[in-house]
């Protein structure tokens, strides 16, 4: 058997999950090829240990699945220096050469998609079907930006003077610090890194402490694809060391750009740190997405969209619909069909079980936040129509709330969990007013085209789903406005975040 095929198996003892299927009461094994289960940092093309390690846990069982190098400021600084050295040569690669390497990386991700998906399931709790979907989505950004690398065009501008020519050149900004979340541990890296490498930048990735294994597996495949040493670096670290590592990545003068996906509060901290050296910044931050269903909507379509947008990854996505506003004319039908759909389609369990559609939340803190929102809503008069309970560990039942009012926390704060609160909306302006506080994503359901166009044009939001609950694709932009983010990822515009425009005035020409 080839070394790249040697399996590494980690088995976890059974754990009792009250209320979960009997199939949950057994041993779960993470079985992936050894080279993909990396636990050291990846800097300058080498796998390096750190002075200490931190545990990575399966959120479904609470069991340790790996111990990963706990990098600190020194390791982060070395990674930045390696990226800076590599930048001088990487930017000289032709666009076609960079394109070929990104395509090889994409091909390797596709080849190893099953094993990469297992890593996501065991470190984040995501159901295997969704993990496979994430790998396909993640790889698509490498494919997309391998193509966009060859389409970075400058401009020749007509000059007002006969003795000069005006050129606008696009050039890579330099070293980019990439700080990513746990909910999409693979795709949030490739969406940023694919654009950065295509533009000619080099990167240092700091993955979330809950999910470093996916980032390290990407580093292994980048190495196999022939990405030069120092171009792609990964420095995992524990929650305790995250502030000090983040400070290096945001303040080191060798870093020209930061890209972050996470909470608005953390994004503001990073922006303040980056301000002293005036770094270019992209921020994909929190949202509070409304899901608005008008009386003219196709109810079955709206219910399908609600299920897809709310319960994907157990409600732990940044574009997850967070508050539902349903006009009174179809409110009762919508609630009845939605409850039936939840009964029929949602199954709690370990992500490796084929029937599981809802895994655990990422940790106990996440579960406690969700339970707090549910109890707050109930104390203010909301009714629990489905779910409402926390099971063992960080499992929370998918929950449907009716009789919701705007003073409840679930309508004021992002939930990041499987809670679906529905507000009965009487007038159109009620929906419009509630939407005004959302700046990333909004979902609209109506069969009235004029109404849809009028509402979507008035929204201050980066993404609008019209009669559709699943929106993300590499061909389209992704990002929010105001406190939900800066800049755009994906699409032809994503690569622009890693480029500077240089104006060249070529004078002294003889007519």
Image: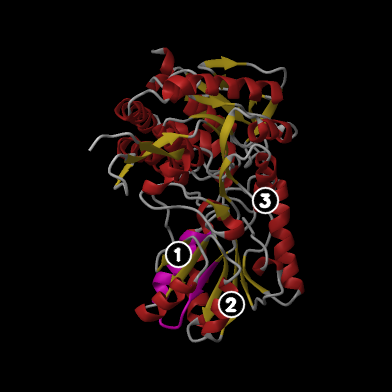
* Whether residue 275 is situated above or below residue 79 in the rendered picture: below
Residue that label 2 marks = 433
Residue 404 in sight: yes
Which residue is denoted by mark 1 in the rendering?
464
What span is colored magenta in the figure? 290-310
Q: How many marks?
A: 3
| Element carrying mark 1 | strand
- Residue 454's x, y, as percent? 42, 78
Residue 360, image x, y percentages = 61, 48
- Considering depth in this image, is 229 or 20 the residue closer to the camera? 229
Assess disc 1: are there few (<14), some (14-19) or many (≥20) residues with their C-alpha within 10 Å of its C-alpha: some
Check disc 3: other Cα within 10 Å, few if <14, some if 14-19, many if 20+: few
- The quarter of the displayed image where residue 494 is located: top left
Q: How is the image coloured?
A: secondary structure
Q: Earlier in the sequence, mark 1 or mark 3?
A: 3
Does the residue at mark 2 contact the one at mark 3 (Cβ under 8 Å)?
Answer: no
Observer-nearest of 263 and 352? 263
Q: Quadrant of the N terminus?
A: top left
Residue 470 in the figure: left or right of residue 250: left
Query: Mark 3 or mark 2, which is nearer the start of the sequence?
Result: 3
Q: In the image, which disc is placed on residue 18?
A: 3
């Amino acid at each position: 058997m080839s070394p790249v095929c040697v399996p590494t198996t980690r088995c976890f003892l059974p754990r009792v999950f009250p209320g979960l299927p009997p199939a949950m009461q057994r041993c779960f094994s993470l079985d992936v090829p050894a080279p993909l289960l990396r636990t050291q940092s990846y800097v300058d093309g080498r796998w390096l240990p750190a002075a200490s390690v931190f545990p990575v846990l399966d959120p479904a069982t609470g069991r340790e699945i790996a111990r990963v190098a706990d990098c600190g400021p020194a390791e982060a600084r070395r990674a930045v220096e390696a990226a800076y050295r590599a930048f001088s040569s990487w930017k000289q690669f032709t666009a076609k050469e960079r394109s070929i390497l990104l395509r090889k990386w994409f091909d390797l991700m596709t080849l190893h998609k099953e094993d990469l998906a297992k890593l996501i399931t065991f470190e984040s709790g995501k159901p295997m079907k969704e993990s496979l979907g994430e790998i396909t989505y993640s790889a698509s950004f490498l494919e997309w930006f391998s193509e966009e690398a060859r389409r970075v065009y400058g401009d020749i501008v007509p000059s007002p003077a006969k003795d000069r020519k005006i050129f606008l050149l696009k050039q890579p900004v330099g070293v980019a610090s990439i700080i990513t979340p746990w909910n999409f541990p693979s795709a949030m890296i490739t969406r940023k890194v694919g654009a950065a490498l295509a533009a000619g930048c080099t990167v240092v990735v700091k993955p979330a402490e809950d999910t470093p294994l996916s980032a390290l597996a990407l580093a292994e495949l980048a190495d196999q694809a022939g990405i030069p040493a120092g171009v792609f670096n990964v420095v995992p670290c524990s929650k305790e060391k995250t502030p000090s590592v983040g400070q290096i990545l945001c303040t080191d003068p060798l870093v020209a750009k930061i890209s972050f996906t996470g909470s608005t509060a953390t994004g503001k901290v990073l922006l303040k740190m980056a301000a002293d050296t005036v770094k270019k910044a992209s921020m994909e931050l929190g949202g509070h997405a409304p899901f608005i269903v008008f009386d003219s909507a196709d109810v079955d379509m709206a219910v399908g969209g609600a299920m897809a947008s709310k319960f994907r990854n157990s409600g732990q996505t940044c574009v997850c619909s967070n508050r539902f506003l349903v006009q009174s004319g179809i409110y009762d039908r919508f609630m009845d069909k939605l409850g039936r759909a939840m009964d029929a389609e949602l199954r709690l369990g370990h992500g490796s079980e084929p029937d599981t559609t809802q895994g655990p939340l990422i940790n106990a803190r996440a579960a406690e936040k969700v339970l707090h929102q549910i109890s707050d809503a109930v104390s203010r008069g909301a009714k629990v129509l489905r779910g409402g309970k926390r099971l063992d560990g960080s499992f929370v039942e998918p929950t449907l709330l009716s009789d919701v009012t705007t003073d409840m926390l679930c309508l004021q704060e992002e939930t990041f969990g499987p809670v679906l609160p529905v507000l009965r909306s009487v007038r159109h302006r009620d929906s419009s007013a509630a939407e005004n506080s959302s700046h990333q994503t909004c979902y609209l359901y109506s069969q009235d085209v004029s109404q849809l166009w009028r509402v979507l044009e008035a929204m201050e939001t980066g993404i609008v789903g019209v009669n559709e609950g699943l929106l993300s694709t590499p061909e389209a932009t992704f990002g929010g406005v105001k406190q939900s983010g800066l800049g755009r990822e994906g699409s032809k515009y994503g690569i622009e975040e890693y480029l500077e425009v240089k104006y060249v005035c070529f004078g002294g020409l003889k007519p």
